[in-house]
Image (tube, grey):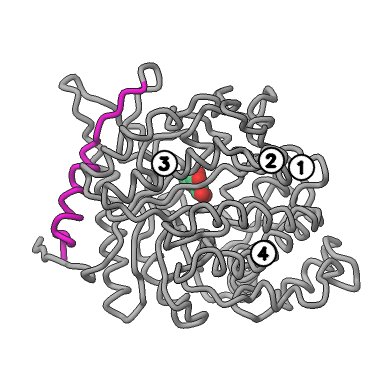
Amino acid sequence: MTSHVITFPDDFFWGAATSAYQIEGAWDEDGKGESIWDHFCHTPGNIEDGSTGDVACDHYHRWPEDIALMKELGLKAYRFSVSWPRILPAGRGKVNQAGLDFYSRLVDGLLEAGIEPFPTLYHWDLPRSLQDEGGWAARSTAEAFVEYTDVLSRHLGDRVKHWITHNEPFSVAFLGHQIGEHAPGLKDTPTSLKVIHHLLLSHGWAVPVLRRNSPGAEVGITLVCIPIVLASSSADNLRVGRKLDGQFNRWYLDPLYGRHYPADQVAEHIADGNLPAEGLVFVEPGDMEAIAAQTDFLGVNYYTTIVLRDEVVPEGENQPPVSSVSEVECTDMGWPINPDGLYQLLNRLHFEYQPGKLYITESGASYSDGPDKDGRIRDQRRLNYLRQHFAAAQRAIKCGVPLAGYFVWSLIDNFEWNKGYAQRFGLIWVDYETQQRILKDSALWYKQVIADNGLVTPT
Ligand code: FCB
């Protein structure tokens, strides 16, 4: 096999990503309010290994060490999320200065290390008191989000130059409100449609606030995009593929890019009884214009694709009309690996929606490889995964896609939501007993990629 060297644009943001609940710990310290994830994890039976994010990676106390590790890797950027209940313990009203100070120190520490901060305002840890008032199903939560955005960006807006409003509204709606695997643990599709609308609305309302408080900064939102791979062009395959693409992708992309919710999907939801015959009754005048606020970039989280079978399984509550092809290689999450899906996705987004810029805000793989006897972590499978996906991203750039950065999920092993600590996505190993961190082989390789601004890839 021959190999060749590929390179990236000069100012490419090589980064890594985390989120507050997954790494910080300190769940009730320094005036922080309770979040829906605190509550969800403290309720027995919700997390597969019975664990919680109470301590997680103890990043709240160990952030200087973690920044030092980022610096050692040569990261150009770091994507983290801010815990809303650290800033506003009750979701609105009283501000917790200690919470603001924490993120202020983190941002200063990153800048001193030459690392560009990319904060996400909402990565799923809603203040619990807002959930008690209806959570994202209530329009008032979108209003509270604007207040939170204002408080935070007034404090960090002078130093932060890249803001991400939301992380994966799809996951909030689907995992949290349709199948109940994530907080707040609801199983109610009609509610989830309202939830999505209020998430998108809060994004649209937050954009002008960020622009005002952080002049010149880039503002965007992060979506998880899950391409649907058809097995054939049979009528059934096309129908199911179009429907799933509508549910997972177009329902979010279309309104953000000024096209309203997709009409075919609205009709499906009416037919399925998820919406009344009048349709989207929760949409008020001006909402769709607000949601379509001009942004500077689209953040894309990419892990996998859904591979359809030709023979379509009948729809049923516990049986989606799709099944993954078993011979496809999967990560420990059971997610099929498909680097070419990333290349195609980036081209599709560029062609169909034309965001000014794209960042891959998450991409990575769960593998449990731990330290060998010599202490070294030979996570070759993660390294291969990243190599293939970096190469796919570079091919997309060569086709003209304005991809400006790539954030590996994740910087460190962390609390993987309802899976607990069993799934490890980190470039850096965490020993949860001692909180010791060890750079895995993939991290050392990534360090070289960043230093070279490129990599060697098999042809
Ligand atoms: C994404 C989440 C992130 C992490 C990865 C594996 O959907 O945004 O927090 O859980 O999946």
The residue at which mark 2 appears reads as 127
Residue shown at the point (53%, 76%) measured from the top left: 233
Q: Nearer the viewer, mark 3 or mark 2?
A: 3
Would you say the residues marked 2 and 1 are in contact, meaning their CB atoms lie under 8 Å apart? yes
Magenta region, residue range = 435-459
Q: CA distance from mark 2 to mark 1?
A: 7 Å
Mark 3 vs 2, N-terminal side: 3
The residue at which mark 4 appears reads as 200
The residue at which mark 1 appears reads as 131
Left or right relative to 35: residue 23: left
Q: Secondary structure at mark 2?
A: loop
Q: Tell me if residue 449 is in the magenta stretch.
A: yes
Q: CA distance from mark 3 to mark 4?
A: 30 Å
The residue at which mark 3 appears reads as 105
Looking at the image, which residue sits at the far top?
Answer: 433
Q: CA distance from mark 3 to mark 2?
A: 22 Å
Mark 1 vs 4, N-terminal side: 1
